[in-house]
Amino acid sequence: MTAVFGHLNPDTDAITAALVYAHLLSRQGTPAQAYRLGELNFETAFVLQQAGVEAPSLLSELPAGSEVALVDHNESAQSLAGLKSLTVTHVVDHHKLGDLETSQPALLRFEPVGCTATILMRLHREAGLSIDATDARLLLSAVLSDTLHFRSPTTTAADREAAAFLAPIAGITDVTAYAMQMFAAKSDLGDTPAEKLLKMDYKVFPFGAGKWGLGVIETTNPGYVFGRQAELLAAMQAEKESSGLDGVLLSVVDILNETNRTLVPSESEAAVVNAAFGASTEAQVADLQDRISRKKQIVPALEAYFAAHA
């Protein structure tokens, strides 16, 4: 049985891609089971509830040599512990190639699109297989989530085409209204502990000789997040120290206004933010303006900065 999973601190794309790809592989003769590597965020929980689908089981380890399929990631720092001891048989991803190593030839599908779901929709069509209503709803939800309802600069024509194809199958007649329901669920943060808010959409990246943690909170209510700024900064500093990171940043993305104000816990991060983005930090907040995509606008700028200062 092939274990299918997305990245740590999973978002809607990671969870739905695992579910749909496991279903697709099983239909194609490769028995597969979807798993998750972390807790669901509020948006993903809403999506699964609306689709009538149970969350995948939580996976913490697998025996060496186990066959796995990766979706929505390919870097070991973002994956299951001990990934290098496992047998990676499939990867479907829309991120840059990281430190992926395989012990045998694997089926790899990478495309520069806004969402893994867009690739999975294409895999169904290429295989001549229909997509049922539940899988269509899951895939559509992921496209809307990862592209911020087509607001993100990662959005491509293929993502728009995928949404248009999937919506009628999913039975969603008003895609905009559904996207707003998803974003409302994402923004309903309540009394969530600051440590959990930081990790809801959080990835660790190698930059130069060190590692940085980059979190994102996408919300229609940024005022709530900044009302908890002190708690979040303390959580960021604690995570930096406990995980031995060189830096931590938390971008607060206003979905509707398409802006990014980033929390900066110390002067060392502030210096990098200023050099990489030309943004000054005031009261531990840097205005990164319309840089709302971690994948396309934040990580590449930091990679360029650290490459120039190696």
Image: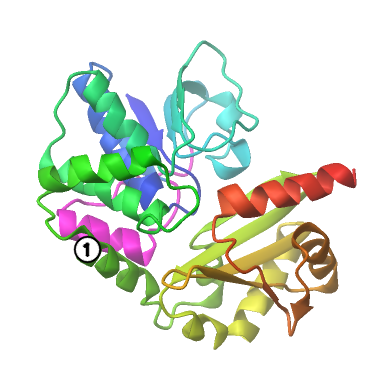
Quarter of the image holding residue 247? bottom right
Q: Is residue 204 above or below residue 98?
A: below
* Magenta span: 37-61
Residue 170 relative to residue 287: left or right:
left
Q: Residue furthest right?
A: 309
Q: Which residue is mark 1?
A: 178
Would you say residue 31 is visible in this rendering?
no
The residue lying furthest to the top in this view is 105
Instruction: Decide whether residue 51 is among the magenta residues.
Output: yes
Can you give x and y, in whole percent of width and height, for residue 250 in the image? 62, 67
In-image side of 145 versus 74 (left or right): left
At x 54%, y 34%, the residue is: 74
Residue 167 located left or right of residue 241: left
| Amino acid on which disc 1 is placed | Tyr
Q: Nearer the viewer, residue 74 or 5?
A: 74
Q: Tell me where residue 52 appears, x and y as whole percent.
A: 14, 54
| Along the line of sight, the residue nearer the viewer: 180 or 13 | 180
